[in-house]
Amino acid sequence: MKNIKNIFLKTFLLSMIVTFIGCQEDEYSFGEIIAPTNIQITAEIVGADAANPNGDGSGVVNFSASADNAVSYKYSYDGVEVVALSGETSISFSELGLNTYTVTVVATGTAGIATSKSIDVEVLSTYAPPVELKTKLFGFDPADPTAVTSRTWKVHAAKAKHFGLGPVAGSTIAEWYGAGPDEKTGVGMYDDRITFSSDGTFSYVTNGTIFGRDPYIVNDLGPNISGTPNGADIENYAFLDYTETYALTAPGGVETISISGNGFIGYYTGGSHNYEIFDRGTPNELVLRTTDGNAEFDWWFIITLE
């Protein structure tokens, strides 16, 4: 019996040593963790030239960042954060007049090690949204211009081509594909509710799930642990209600809703999170389009008042 106990003890100790060695080997398999270095940031103010060094008044700036050993990037300014995995993003500064903004780029490396660098940009914003647009979007009341008002919108599921895609900068709504009435029932889009407020707040009710494009939705919002892949789409991706900010701008004279952070409308496509207002002539309705993260398609949406 004693010999059996000794054999058992030796076997147990040997297995513990092997396990320990195995764990030690695993610890070194990840390689050296290196913080990003040599961050380079460029800022292109839209419409800037010799006569207009601070831009065309739209307040839009295109940023590009790079760094050694970086795997993703994030921009922050005035309490707003914008994730830009590739290092490129567009930011709309809507405060009227000539203003200087400090923009910080956070470059993240392996194991989440981060390095940051800041630059200042001096940008001119002269765009004042017309009363009719503000009234339609968030219920602006000219008789009480300081009142906080809001309106809630949803994807117009009952209308043909309420969601679709086409070529970048195309002029035909959903030229390559347009969803039929109620075609996307059950994918996590039709029960979303989008509220624009006069104070610049953008509130989004998801009712638990959203609809989006792979890989943008996974890269920007996190791994898919519950949604259903369907081709390049992910349906019913679990995502909580959220709040961002938005600004009304007009780069190149095109009325645009620019949403901060990862804010989106209807279907997550990544990209700049800028939604051009293609048509606002129909009562209680807006036709919007946005370009996806790879500048591959323009995505179209028709939204209507709740």
Image: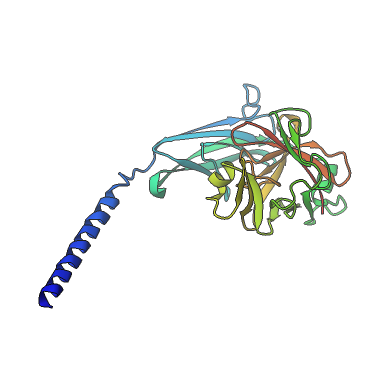
* Image quadrant where residue 49 sits: top right
Asked whether the viewer can see residue 185, the reply is yes
Q: Residue at x 78, y 33 (%)?
A: 173
Looking at the image, residue 174 sits to the left or right of residue 32; the answer is right
Depth order, front residue of 139/268: 268
Q: Which residue is drawn at 59% across and 45% down?
A: 217
Looking at the image, residue 9 sits to the left or right of residue 169; the answer is left
Looking at the image, residue 1 sits to the left or right of residue 287; the answer is left
Find residue 3 and report its horizontal and vertical position in percent. 10, 73
Asked whether the viewer can see residue 39, the reply is no
> Which residue lies most toward the bottom here?
1
The quarter of the picture where the N terminus appears is: bottom left
Depth order, front residue of 201/264: 264
> Which residue lies most toward the left here?
3
Find residue 190 and report its horizontal and vertical position in percent. 75, 52
Display colour scheme: rainbow
The quarter of the picture where the C terminus appears is: bottom right
Find residue 205 and report its horizontal and vertical position in percent. 70, 57
Q: Which residue is drawn at 62% across and 41% down?
A: 231
